[in-house]
Every structure is written in C-alpha cells, then in structure tokens.
Amino acid sequence: MTGSLIGTRVLRVEDPPLLTGRSSFVANLDLDGALVAHYVTSIEAHALIEGIDTAEARSMPGVVDVVTAADLDFGPLPGGSPDYPPGTNRGTLAIDRVRFVGEPVAVVVAETAAQAADAAETIVVDYRPLPVVLDIATAAENETLLFPEAGTNVILTGSGAKPEPPDFSVCEVVVETETVNQRVAPCPIEPRVAASYWTDDGRLVHYASCQGVHPIQKGLASFYGLDPSQVRVVTADVGGSFGAKARLYPEDVLLPFLAKRAGRPVRWTPGRRDDMVGLGHSRAQLQRITIGGRRDGRIEAIEAEIIGDCGAYPNTAPALMRNAGLVLPGPFDVENVHWTGKVVVTNTTPTVAYRGAGRPEGGHMLNRGIDAFAHEIGMDPLDVRRVNLLEADQLPWTNPTGLVYDSGDYRAALELVATEVDHDGIRARQEQERAVGSTTRTGIGWATFIDRTAGLPSEDYGSIELRPDGTFLVLTSSSPYGQGHYTSWAMLVVERTGVSLADIEVFHGDTDVVPKGGITGGSRSAQRAGSAVAEATDDLVERAKATAAELLEAAVGDVVLDLDAATFHVAGAPGAATVGWSEIAAGWAANRRDQGHHDVALRCESDFVGEGPSVPYGMYAAVVTVDLETGAVTLDRIVSVDDAGTILNPMLVEGQLHGGIAQGVGQALWEEFRYDEDGNPLTGSFLDYGIPSAAELPSFDVHLMETPSPNNPLGFKGVAESGCIGATPAVQNAVIDALSHLGVRHIDMPLVPERVWEAIRRATAD
C-alpha cells in the first residue's frame, strides 16, 4: 500500500457480484422442496370478521395448507411497548376485526406461487364494515375507535425541551405555521421476502431481507419460546430498506409455524401491490410550529405541536414524534424551545421508521416555520438564518431538548452554499422576471438542519482473523443494504495492515457466524461498526508485532509495520530481515500449538459503544422554475453542503447523499400515499405512486466539509439520512418563494401541478 486510503475514492468491492448476477437474495435461494406462502389480506379498511370460508381453497391443486387465526394460539408480535394501551399490540393474522386494507387474514401454502394465488382467490371472508378513520386530526377526537377496549385512539403523548410553553407576548412578531408531512411509502426495489425451515435436530433456520439478523433472531426466539441459540437467521444481499425492514412483520413471524406444519421450507415473496400496503409507511405527521422573535430577524422562542399517525397499529410513530422534537431548534441559537405531541391510530397501513425516522419531519417543520417568520418581517429567509446561526466557538452546545451538538462550523457551510448557488444572482433574475411579466418564475429555497446519528445506545461488533495465507476475514454486526460496508471496512483494515483490498473478506448476516449485533440504521454504521473493526484490527496488529519480534529476534518495542510493504521489520533497519503477514500467521499458530491450544488463528474482536451520538448537519439550497399557467414545477438545481465528520470514502458519502436527496425531492414534489374515503388505497403501485426517476432530477451539486466528531476514535458522523432531511423543505420553500410575490405563503406537499396551480388561482383571484 502506498499512502492512505482514507478520504480517497475507492470503488465498491461489493458491486461486481450485484452487476454480474452473482448476488444472493432470499427470493432466489435454492431451498430444496420449498413451498410458497400467499397471504389473503383484507379488502376492508375497518370491519368485523364474521366468517372465513376456506373449503374450496383446501381442495385446490397443489395446496398443502390453509391457515386462519382460528388455527393459531399465539400472543401479539414481539416488540410492542408496555406504554401502549392494552389490546393495541398487533397479532399475526386478524382475529375478529381488520383495521386496514392489506392486513393479513389467512394464508395459503402451496407447491407453486400460481397455485397458492389461485387458491387464495377462492377464500371468502364475510366482513361487516365499520366506520373508517383516516384523518389524523379526526382520529384524535375519538368518535370512532379502532380499539374499543382501549377507549381512545390516542396511543401516546409526549413533550420535550422547556417544561413550559414560551411566553410569546414579549415577542415583537409571532408567526404560526401548520404543515402536513404527508404519508409516504418507502418503496425499496426488493419487497419483503423471507423463508423458514426446521432442521432435523429441531433448529429453526430463517432467511430474511432485513437490516440486521440478531434482532430478528431475538424476536423469533421470543415468539416461539426458543433459546436464541436454537434460531439461525441469515441475510445476504438486500435490495433496499430505508428503515422499513428493520423489524419483523406478521407474515415473517408466521413462516416458521407454516414450515413446521408442512415439514418443508416455506418461502414468502409478496408482489409489489401487496408490499405497497403491507410494508410500513412513514412520515405522516400533522405539525404546527410557532416562532416568536424580533423584527431584526432574531428568533427568541419556538413552540411545536406534533400529531403523528401510527396507522392501524402502534409501532414506531412515538419515536418519530420524539425525534422530530429532539432536533429543534436545528443549528440555531435559540434556548426557549418547547414541543408537545401525540400519536393516534387510523385505518391505514402501520407506520415505521423511514430514512431519518423523525428528524426529516422535525427539519421540515422548522424550516417552513423560519421561512414563514422571514416573510412576515420582510427579511430574506437566508438572512434570518444568518442572524440566528450558532457560531463554531459555541460548540459543543446542548440544545434545549438535551442533544449535544458535538462539532461543526454552521456559518461556513451556509456561506458556502449561498455562494455556490449564486443567491444574489437568483434574486436579480426574479426581479427581471417580474418586471417583464414572465409566465415562469424562479424560486430559491433553503434548508438548514442538524441530524442526530448513532442515537440508540448499543454495542456494535467487529472482529478480524488472520488466515494462514496472509489474508484477512472481517466479521461485522453491520448489515448493509446498499451502503458500501464491505468497501468501507476493508479500507479501514488496509489502512492498518498495508495489505490490498483483494486480501480482505468482509462477512455479515449469519447469527451462527457473527455472534452479536443490532440493526443497521440511524446512520450509525461507520462511527460504531466501523470503529469496532478498526479497534479489532489495531489490536491484531499489536499482537502480530509480538510474533514478529520473536521471528526477528528483537524486542517488541523495536518492531514496526511498514504499511507500504505490508511487512514487519526492526526499527532503523528497513533493509534487513522482514516478516510478512503469512509468516505472522504461521508463527502465531505454532506458538498456540506449543501452548496446547486447538484454536490457532490470530483473531481479535471488539464491542464498540462510543461516547454518544454525533450531530452532522447540512445547508441546502434548491432552485426551481414554476409555470404560472400550469402549476408545473421544474427543479433546476439543488446545492448541498454536508458535514459528516471524517470522510472515509467520498464516493460512498456522495452516493448516500444523492440517494437521500432524490428521496427528499420525491416527497416534496410527487410522493404521497393516498386513500379514498373508504380507506381503499389509491396509490398502490408504481403506476400511480409518484417515485421520481433520473429523468425528473437534475445533477446534484454536493459539497463536503469535515469537522471530526469527538464521540468515536475515527471522527465519523452519519450522513445517510441527511439528503432527505434537507432536500424536502428546500424544494418546498423554493416553490413558495417563487410565488411569494403573489401573496402565497404556504402550499402543502407534494407540490404537484394541480395543487400549485390552485394556490396561484386563489392568490390571483383575491
């Protein structure tokens, strides 16, 4: 190795198998004799089940089994909170009531997918429809209850920051803004897929498309009353997740039961329409933010109210509510902050974590509020942000919710993005457009935010083993689904050992091989799992020096590792005898044998905890063109400046930002999961759900800053979720800015042409 790899653009080592068809997804695993499960799901959003007729299905060709709730004797799914009202935890199959379209009611197991689907079509469910509750605010009124025994649709309430609301009477200006952070579907390319079978000795083997095998192992063991050692969970390649596959779903949990009844493996692969209503949705918050301050732009107080939508069953919506409040007041020097919130159930798909898990919602709410405040006092939204930014010498800073901002230079980032986007030039262009009466108008929008990454306390595992041939095997608890972990962890090993990337194998995703781990989520991997791999490798190098010292007949303190040559030698004598990694492996093994050990490999491991979460941040600007005659929005530019601490591989960081920005723009302009008044999904496929393609997006102008985090030895901060935190409010603010001369102050997302045109019509009609 020559020089350091850290900070260089290293091509992903995991891509060749994916690009050449040598990937390993659950749907194409060779499971001998595997049967196919097909779930029958509710066609009613809210109804009592008065009967299920499965007689014809049981006699259909190829059918091995048909199961309804009457065949089950299980408790609720693992993971429910004791804080939720009794009786609200979800089961595997609906028993006497369905609460959303797409809820599993029965399952058919057959020899082929076609046979299972044909049999499922013959199952008749007798529903008695009940009133449907879809609107978040309406649900909070408790007029129609999803869980009558609970007596309320309000699952949980919360509050944070200052214990009492601000006294806005002392403020010169007070502005209240209500925003809707609409329901979206995560839409990974690969849907949920899983398979189960039992070994002859009674062990359960479960394959999952997931974000971490150990939580799945723990959940299945708990559900089936097994010791975790009796459950092996395996994952390999995962075609996207964004948080939605972090936990078990009812369809996953039931597969071991079906496999045991059939005595054969059972695999479940839902179609896209099934996954659009079965895989958890997210965002889905009604937000109200009040900002008080002075006419010179200084913000003095912020109060927020959040109502979150759990969907039909409580899951992660309370955490999303809390995370939205946690990131207030963003990168701004405001001490007087207060938020309250509650989460409710509705007759919709249950909500889960989705890229950012509450922090995009909090950033959206804050940035819309700041723009509304700026418009009220007649100040440029950029200048309001300039007035209130925390200075670099104020960090570390503890925000009113208790989050410690670890490091950064917010002002430098904001001024960089203002320069790169040419803020002054865009303002001049707007004046020219208005002067000539152009039918298209330019808008510029800003988003200034902080994130909280690696926020959940847990250990991350990493180990490294030196093989006899001088190559290395790395085991990691991180479970990638597109992030590039194999490349990243290999780079960390190269940096410490001097070997080539080709000499390092990274392995994850098998509870029989990797002893422990959590989920990959919350932008935690580099700072937690990466640090574990780095610590284990540092330990291995130190142990290798002891063996090299014996082979070189020198003191350990005199032995150095030449990273360029990947060899050990005595300090001050680089041209003398050297020892390579294969010789270290042989020498270590010989010593172990002499000591009577059977395990002769040089192997080190680490459980890394870290000093707390890191707080990356971003400053984003979006430039749009709005057609006044049609309401059509064109995104012309998006410029971002992100600080992710130490940059391990700029190509991987930029890739994460590009993906996040695309998802954020998608929510701002097109994406919304919609229902009709009876709770029937209206956007249940890619034909009617507005996912953007490359054709709708400009090239992204991404800039990186580096202020290392003190909370892990590598200085990393998370970056995977930043793009969708910043892009969404930046684009929304840009569209409103383009129309602000007409008096438009707010348009809810998504900013589809019809909605924008209607806002223009209302403004010009007044």
Image: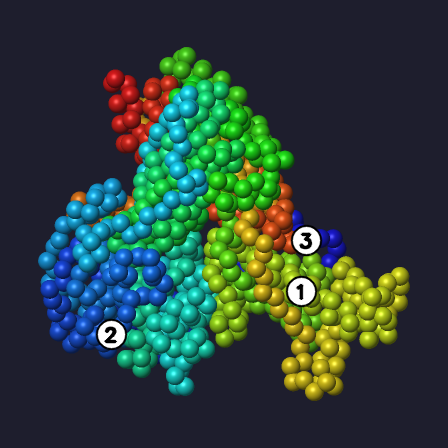
Residue under the image location 27 percent in, 65 percent down: 91
Q: Residues within 10 Å of mark 2 (few under 14, many from 20)?
A: few
Q: Estimate the x, y position of residue 582 in percent, counting from the top left.
A: 73, 73
N-terminal of the pair, mark 3 or mark 2, is: 3
Mark 2 vs mark 1: in front? 2
Badge 1 or badge 3: first in the primary sequence: 3
Residue 480 spot, x, y in % from top left: 50, 59
Identity of the residue drawn at 65% across and 65% down: 536
Task: Identify the element where label 3 is drawn.
Answer: loop
303 or 490: nearer the viewer? 303
Q: Is residue 130 left or right of residue 709?
A: left
Question: Which label was assigned to residue 537?
Answer: 1
Mark 2 touches mark 1? (CB < 8 Å): no
- Residue 371: percent from left, percent from top: 42, 28
Q: CA distance from mark 2 to mark 1?
A: 48 Å
Indicate left or right for 452 with 96 as reference: right
Residues at marks 1 and 3 touching, judged by CB atoms closer than 8 Å = no
In this rendering, position of residue 143 left or right of residue 320 = left
Q: How is the image coloured?
A: rainbow
Name the amino acid type tagged 3. Leu
Q: Which mark is residue 73?
A: 2
Q: Which mark is residue 5?
A: 3
Work out how far the residue at label 3 is from the one at label 2, CA to CA, in angstroms.
Answer: 55 Å
Q: Is residue 71 above or below residue 508?
A: below
To which quarter of the image does residue 766 belong? Answer: top left
